[in-house]
Image (spheres, helix red, strand yellow):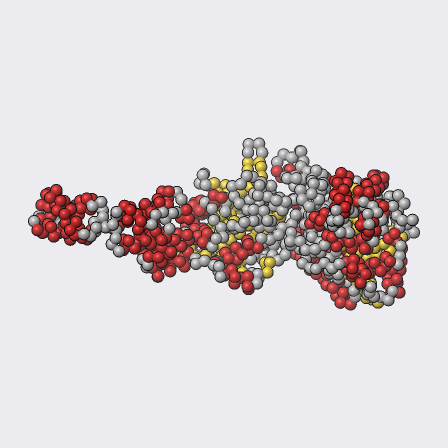
Amino acid sequence: MNYEAVIGLEVHVQIKTESKMFSPVAAGYGHEPNTLTDPVVLGLPGTLPVMNKRAIDQIIKTGLMLGCDIAPVCKWDRKNYFYPDSPKNYQISQYDQPICIGGKLEIELPGPSRNVMGKHKFVALTRIHLEEDVGKLNHFDDDSLVDYNRAGTPLMEIVSEPDMSSGDEAYAYLTALKQIMICGGISDCDMEKGQLRCDANISIRPRGSDTLGVKVELKNLNSISGVRNGIDYEIQRQIKVVEAGGQVIQETRRWDAEAGAATLMRTKEMAHDYRYFPDPDLMPVRVNREWLENLRATLPELPYERQRRYFEEHDLPYTLTSVLVPDHRLAAFFEDAAEKCGQPKAAANWIANDLLRELSAAGIGIDESKLRPEHVAGLVKLVDGGVISNNIAKEVFVEMFRTGERPEEIVENKGLKQSSDTGELTAVCREVIGANPKSVEDYKAGKENAINFLKGQVMKATRGKANPQVVDQVLREELGKL
Amino acid sequence: MSDPLYYRTASALSRELEAKKISSLELVRAVIERTRAVDGTVGAFISFDEDDALARARASDARREGGEALGPLDGIPVGIKDILAVEGQPLTCASRMLGDFVSPYDATAIGKLKAAGAIPWGRLNMDEFAMGSSTENSSVKTTANPWNTDCIPGGSSGGSAACVAAGEAPLTLGSDTGGSIRQPAALCGVVGMKPTYGLVSRYGLVAFASSLDQVGPFAHTVEDAAILLQAVAGYDRRDSTSYKTDIPDYRAALQENRGPWKLGIPSEYFGEGLDPEVEKAVRAAIDFYRKEGCEIVEVSLPHTEYAVGVYYIIATAEASSNLARYDGIRYTHRSSEATDAIDLYFRSRAEGFGEEVKRRVILGTYVLSSGYYDAYYLKAQKVRTLIRGDFLKAYNQVDALLTPTTPAPAFRKGEKTDDPLRMYLSDIYTIGANLAGIPGISIPCGFSGDGLPIGLQILGRPYQEADLFAIARRFEEAHDYHAKHPGL
């Protein structure tokens, strides 16, 4: 039989805030264990949580970017369970009144090849709610130690509808989600730092069926490709179970990326009863119109909207937009450069090719680059005005990247101006013709290609500064004279 | 003949300090001496730090010498229930679970006391985690009622009430979740007040039932209670349930607000189970107010009969979650027998918690469980809203309600320890105020034939503590029950 998979994702995203969700102590990553704590984070007797309004701003922004309805009132609930990483043995979360309801995420499925745009689709969202992160257990030979630095960090849970059908779609979903979060300044979404974590609910059913199968929850998907691999593995496992005459059992499984396999964590019978109830320490949150509209005014252009605009306004090809759009800083860099030189396509090419290559070689991010949009714009203008050739421009680009000097300065100081001086070039052409009788003979014999060799020699002799069109013209004239 | 130093009111002491007739150091020494003399019998204190109190007294005297006294409480010792966090002092909640715990921070109420120059004095005994009505659930010791040491002082703030009654401090702070200030105040013959929910910050008050807990004062007189409440009341950004409101000058209100008031008598509070001697004393108090020109009106609080049931669902549900943090992992008692993490939880909690705490955690866990939540917790919250509605409706008609604080005077130690339900009923008249969030005060209004104190409870409108003080003061002015002291 032919099966299809039904996949829903629960994604946890840490919100980037100065302080924690319910206490004024700093939030952060990579600090000495148990230094980002205070009596509230540690749940010491008598302490009380106080809501971080900035985290609410950020989740509302997220909801608005994803087209969610923002609840006029939401509340806080306690999720009760015992675990050593949880200082209070309950987690403050939102149970039946989340702040964001519904919504959808636009994703791009893999295209037929890397250079061709794939199909777009919208994955429906169920809800987004806010909660506090827990600490981290570190296991050693004889004991386990707890680090509560992460505890209390604002954490969003974004729950999708069972609206995906493959590991590829899940991969595309996470990629798109990550881009939006970064673009909105909500989170850096670094999975290695645990800033984005994903659990998947997976079931299979005969293709075309409209009933849902028994779902398995897959945890510990620690990278975006891990999500894809884990899901595909689980789909195949379920198909094998069913084809062998068995039944899929509702359970939670843990993905082991190294082993490329998942193992059983717990069955439905072992599931927790979280005994949710409204947290009596916190008041419900009312979001009024003004609050909402103020945040709406801060929303950025979303990546796919931006891509469509680049197609329409700048006539950029997919291959360029697919490089520029995902990184909003790169996109902003491009737009600045394009505006300064009035030639978006040329600017885009420099940024998508040369700049990214140099950044990657130097191992730095775009914010650290000495080369700024005005450098790119200046370079484009120099090439466009015939002041330097494309080849020289590449040389100038590397120099600009290295030193941060303006392109005009580099061209001036190094004497890289393109030569269109016919008199000067005629002398060089004659020398080249004299030194390469074989090529001249070939050209005369009708081998048109031979002129390219001669042109190359002229360029070499002028160290690339000669205007290629002028060289072509002068060479033909001189050869015609022979 | 005037009272010895340790039995004088805070307002009298304040005047004498101001006039430099006494020093804070003399006062604190007198209190320490008194505590050493009687606490072996009374057992109000779990521990006290004499050096800390003496150092603070010296600092207070130095301030006063420099003309920088901080107000009426500067230099006056205030006993602290062992449920409020004081930086550098033990915070045990009378539980083995927190036997070694020292608080690294001050509760907001304590911070305010210190800012007013008051001297936090000792750690007062209580029922473990404030769960009880007799202080017999303390894991440390029992506290005696100073009027009859075979009797209980009430609870859970039994140490706070006995401490004032025995002259071991002129003022104390306690907490009231279902009557834990008013009930022991009544049984020990002192003034005890539970403010409106949200008036005093709960930051640093170890949570029993978060939606019911309030910090409040114990004192010899209404004026003293007002002075202490004045110091600790007010909005606190660290407590999201604290209320932004202007705190009136309670002492000034005592002078200005002279009534007469329209006072309600809830018929449900005078039914079966009310001790005749208590009823007689409370009825006499009602007659007093009538003679003073107050209009006395019968009112009904029809959902009263559900209060105890609703309370034991909501309070235990919240407690089961609030007490989850005491788990053997971080700062609590940790079992040395445990074999793995789960076993560590089980053993540490089994060893660390007493019987009543376990009973309530189990009950609370049950009422929140999947499948039972709607029938118990949710239903209880709905009835709670009706109970609050009863009170607010009554306040459309009257300024305050007069009731007995407790159904009977203090009972004997051990009398009800085997019968939790009978024990729970000793809070039957006080629980309503916590469920409704309204303020209540208990003042001495007589003695039983056995010489045990009887309390009059006055319940008021939300945030109208000034009215409550004024009404209570009117009775106090005309009687001397508050001025009597037990023979210890």
Label total for image:
0
Where residue A234 appears, as percent x and y from the top left, is 46, 46
Asked if residue B420 shows in the view, the reply is no
Whole-percent x, y for residue B150 in the image: 87, 43
Q: Vertical placement of B342 versus A47: above or below?
A: above
Q: Position of residue B478 (x, y in %)?
A: 88, 59
| Percent of width and height locating residue A23 | 60, 49
Q: Residue at x 42, y 48 (%)?
A: A367
Of residue A339 and residue A106, the one placed in the foreground of this image is A339
Is A377 on the left-hand or right-hand side of B269?
left
Q: Residue at x 45, y 58 (%)?
A: A300
Pick whichever, B426 or B11, lies toward us.
B11
Q: Is residue A288 left or right of residue B439?
A: left
B472 displayed left or right of B343: right
Q: Is residue A13 visible?
A: yes
- Residue found at x 74% / y 49%: B68
Query: Which picture quadrant has residue B298?
Result: bottom right
Residue at left offset 36%, top offset 53%: A374
Direction front: furthest residue: B66
